[in-house]
Image (tube, rainbow, N blue to C red):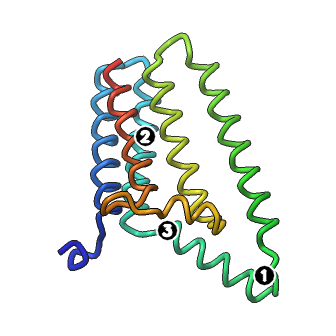
Amino acid sequence: MLESLGTNPTQLLGLVSFASTTIACIFAKRNSPNEGWAWTALAITNAAFFFEIIFGIRHRLHDVADSLLFSAGLYEGRADLQYFLIFVSAAVLLFLSLLLFFLRRARNPGLSIATAASLTILGLFVLEVISLHQIDQILYQKIGPVLLVGWLWCIACVAIVLSTLL
């Protein structure tokens, strides 16, 4: 039935999760006027994740990167580039998480949790674009009808929704 709608259980879980976090962040903005700009940014970020699921931008980026590597004759040796990109992405996301933690830690722990969870989701999308086969094998394992990556999105989104209550 979901295929007739152009989706699957993993995408559906992602859509529900990201829609819920977007709405939760909008309500958190209304209840936190001093930090409304940050909750607005998180609402926009999670709405972008929602639309990413609809349009599959990460898969299109991966396909473009593969075709560029093929045309340059570098596809077979891409593993070193993938490891480098994963390292750089992890370093940037960790730096941003630490920076945001130290800037926001005294004011609102919920906002820090929501930001870290959103950065984690972004990291998962980045990993999907880079598409190192060993990591793909882990992220795309089925747990019930949903891939592990979908459950990870959901867990992060639950953390965001709960963080809006702090």
The local secondary structure at tag 2 comes to: helix
Q: Where is residue 162 in the image (x, y as percent from the top left)?
A: 33, 28
The N terminus lies in quadrant: bottom left
The CA span between labels 2 and 1 is 34 Å
Badge 2 or badge 3: first in the primary sequence: 3
The CA span between labels 3 and 1 is 24 Å
Asked whether disc 2 touches disc 3, contact meaning CB atoms under 8 Å apart, the reply is no
- Compared across the picture, whether 6 is left or right of 48 comes to left
Asked whether disc 3 touches disc 1, contact meaning CB atoms under 8 Å apart, the reply is no
The local secondary structure at tag 3 comes to: helix
Q: Where is residue 89 in the image (x, y as percent from the top left)?
A: 69, 50
Viewer-side label of 2, 3: 2
What amino acid type should be assigned to the residue bearing mark 2? Ala
* Residue that label 1 marks: 76
Viewer-side label of 3, 1: 1
What amino acid type should be assigned to the residue bearing mark 3? Ile
Q: Give whichever of 104, 33 is nearer the camera.
A: 104
User: Alpha-carbon neighbours of circle 2 within 10 Å: few (<14), some, or many (≥20)?
Assistant: many
Q: Give whichever of 145, 126 is nearer the camera.
A: 145
Q: In this view, does 31 lie above or below 8?
A: above
Rendered image: mark on residue 57: 3
The CA span between labels 2 and 3 is 20 Å
